[in-house]
């Protein structure tokens, strides 16, 4: 007791002399990113494909060259169009832009094939023809355009090229080219139906397409049984056929070119663990890939994975691969994280760790370089079988979150870097986020992911976290790199903790109930977008205050050998926006103050 009183008295003296928690104001001018250039054609203009890729690339010491936004934007039905006519990006102009980068001497590329072949992810789910219209008139085949582009890039043996593609999801996009929710649900049910499983020599593009209309028993599926017309099914299958054929052609071009520095990275979009229409497509594409290529769960994280892998290939781990200790909390790691993923969560985590060349250990062994903590959904089936009461279920949820936070604190005290994934899909409400904000040091994390679709959280967290570990291990980080990394972490934490778990629910209700609008498209019907933006800003100001305070009082790892930390500076959020004029996701600028000496804490209060 006497010792506590003495410490309290000492702390009071420090506070009275002005040694309170330091907060640096955001810098008026950011340090310029310097380093090798990557020419990047994004999947589309959503934050995960634009600003967050910029943050990650700059945190790894690269600069990112990108075309004008109008060339890769997506516009939903009823929204202002690109060039007054297009709802999608413009492949020919992007093709020309990439060739310009090559002429200027660029030798690193991350290129979205969905954008270059179809004008974006959403458009790739709707295009039935290989023909693309040229801006000045005339047409070009997407397959021809890609062949010319890859041939040009392969001519320079110094080029390192990452080609990003996707397996088409089970249904197209609602609100694009007239797509309705009813049609989406019907087509998804049709696509999720089991097909004959092809293996060996029978696994060909021709056989896959021939079996598109067949159920698992080999009999033809009746469109009417799914509430669909023959025209709807024909269009859907034609889109799938086009997309599969283009992917197959790209793989052939890369294989035939002999270009060792070309990599094909394919993501699986909105899938199913069952024998769906995707199963043969996935198996075929995987069989065609080379050792240096990969097919993994997730699409919106493809650029993250490519940028991280690019850095790891140019900057090896060192004398041995990174050892990652894995701990799961919740009990369902042997199941898919949601209804839209094609494999159990544990397998997806292991596939991604293999992709990054990491060595896997059990969590908390003491032998790991990095610890990975994953919150899964609770095992409600086991609860039902055990006839647990609601109180017992609530206690289980609380314990899962508490155990995770306690282990995070243990690893933090041991100076072990931590990657954190919330793959619970909202099953715990705000419990984890609240516990982390009150009890953890958020800014200490290597990376965090929990926002948006469950299929991308693994790739997002591991690409950011393992690449950051490699930077710190190599001791190559600069102030500009550290600041870019801080933005990647702040962006993930703030959008998940504050927007997804608090503000978005209020906006959804406000748009539907008060404005009579559609949260998925503010233009149909046309509603007061300025009022929605104002509500977003005020809601985020309130919801983010405590999270920002936590980050500003956090320390971050600045070096691993020797181990060093620095304190976060001030954080300011500005320029809120809805990239697709919908409530699903937001964009925001993150302004940072200068880093400080490590913050110190005594009796729960920060005094430096």
Image: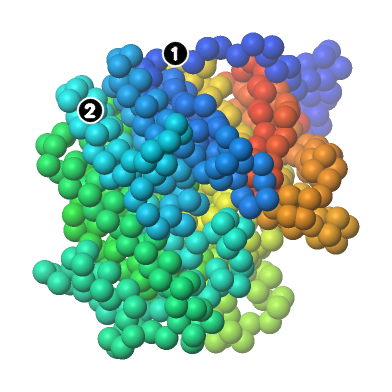
Q: Please determine whether, in this image, residue 16 is positioned above or below residue 304.
A: above
Q: Please determine whether, in this image, residue 515 is positioned above or below residue 441.
A: below
- Residue mark closest to the camera, 2 vs 1: 2
Between 120 and 411, the residue placed more toward the observer is 120
| Side of 332 where 387 appears, left or right | right
Residue 12 appears in which quarter of the rendering? top right
* Disc 2 to disc 1, C-alpha distance: 27 Å
Mark 1 is surrounded, within 10 Å at the Cα level, by few (under 14), some (14 to 19) or many (20 or more) other residues, namely some
**Residue furthest front in the image:** 137
Residue holding disc 1: 34
Marking on residue 152: 2
Q: Position of residue 273 (x, y in %)?
A: 39, 71
Q: Earlier in the sequence, mark 2 or mark 1?
A: 1
Marking on residue 587: none
Q: Residue at x 36, y 48 (%)?
A: 131
* Colour theme: rainbow
Between 298 and 398, the residue placed more toward the observer is 298
The C terminus: image quadrant: top right
């Amino acid at each position: 007791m006497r010792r506590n009183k003495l410490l309290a008295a000492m702390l009071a003296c420090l506070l009275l002399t002005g040694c309170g928690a330091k907060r640096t104001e955001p810098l008026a001018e950011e340090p310029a990113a310097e380093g090798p250039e990557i020419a990047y054609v994004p999947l589309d203009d959503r934050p995960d494909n634009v600003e967050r890729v910029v943050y990650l690339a700059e945190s790894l010491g690269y600069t990112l060259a990108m075309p004008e936004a109008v060339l890769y934007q997506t516009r939903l039905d009823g929204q202002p169009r690109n060039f007054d006519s297009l709802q999608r990006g413009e492949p020919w102009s992007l093709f020309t832009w990439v060739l310009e980068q090559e002429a200027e001497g660029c030798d690193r590329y991350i290129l979205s094939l969905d954008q270059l072949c179809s004008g974006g992810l959403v458009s790739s789910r709707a295009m039935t023809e290989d023909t693309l219209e040229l801006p000045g008139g005339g047409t070009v085949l997407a397959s021809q355009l890609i062949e010319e582009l890859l041939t040009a890039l392969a001519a320079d043996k110094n080029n390192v090229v990452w080609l990003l593609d996707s397996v088409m999801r089970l249904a197209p996009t609602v609100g694009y080219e007239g797509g309705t929710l009813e049609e989406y649900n019907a087509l998804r049910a049709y696509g999720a139906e089991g097909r004959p499983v092809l293996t060996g020599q029978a696994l060909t593009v021709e056989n896959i397409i021939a079996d598109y209309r067949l159920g698992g028993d080999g009999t033809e599926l009746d469109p009417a049984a799914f509430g669909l017309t023959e025209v709807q099914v024909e269009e859907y299958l034609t889109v799938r056929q086009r997309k599969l054929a283009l992917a197959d052609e790209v793989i052939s071009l890369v294989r035939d070119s002999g270009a060792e520095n070309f990599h094909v990275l394919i993501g699986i979009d909105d899938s199913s663990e069952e024998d769906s229409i995707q199963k043969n497509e996935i198996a075929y594409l995987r069989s065609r890939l080379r050792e240096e290529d990969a097919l993994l769960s997730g699409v919106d994280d493809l650029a993250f994975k490519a940028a991280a892998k690019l850095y790891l290939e140019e900057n090896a781990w060192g004398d041995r691969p990174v050892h990652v200790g894995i701990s799961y909390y919740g009990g369902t790691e042997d199941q898919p994280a949601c209804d839209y993923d094609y494999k159990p969560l544990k397998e997806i985590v292991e596939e991604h760790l293999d992709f990054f060349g990491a060595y896997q250990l059990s969590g908390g062994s003491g032998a790991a370089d990095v610890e990975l903590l994953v919150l899964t959904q609770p095992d409600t089936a086991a609860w039902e079988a055990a006839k647990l009461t609601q109180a017992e279920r609530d206690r289980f949820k609380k314990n899962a979150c508490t155990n995770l936070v306690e282990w995070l604190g243990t690893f933090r005290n041991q100076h072990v870097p931590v990657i954190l994934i919330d793959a619970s899909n909202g099953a715990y409400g705000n419990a984890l986020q609240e516990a982390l904000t009150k009890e953890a040091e958020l800014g200490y994390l290597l990376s965090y992911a929990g926002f948006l679709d469950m299929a991308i959280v693994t790739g997002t967290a591991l690409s950011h976290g393992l690449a950051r570990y490699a930077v710190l291990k190599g001791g190559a980080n600069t102030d500009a790199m550290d600041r870019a990394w801080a933005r990647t972490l702040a962006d993930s934490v703030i959008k998940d903790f504050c927007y997804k778990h608090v503000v978005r629910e209020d906006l959804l209700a406000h748009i539907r109930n008060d404005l009579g609008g559609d949260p998925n498209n503010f233009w149909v019907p046309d509603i007061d977008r300025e009022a929605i933006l104002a509500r977003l800003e005020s809601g985020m100001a309130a919801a983010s205050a405590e999270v920002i305070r936590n980050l500003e009082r956090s320390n971050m790892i600045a070096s691993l050998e020797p181990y060093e930390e620095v304190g976060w500076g001030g954080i300011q959020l500005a320029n809120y926006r809805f990239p697709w004029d919908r409530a699903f996701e937001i964009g925001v600028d993150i302004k940072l103050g200068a880093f400080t000496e490590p913050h110190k804490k005594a009796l729960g209060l920060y005094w430096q």
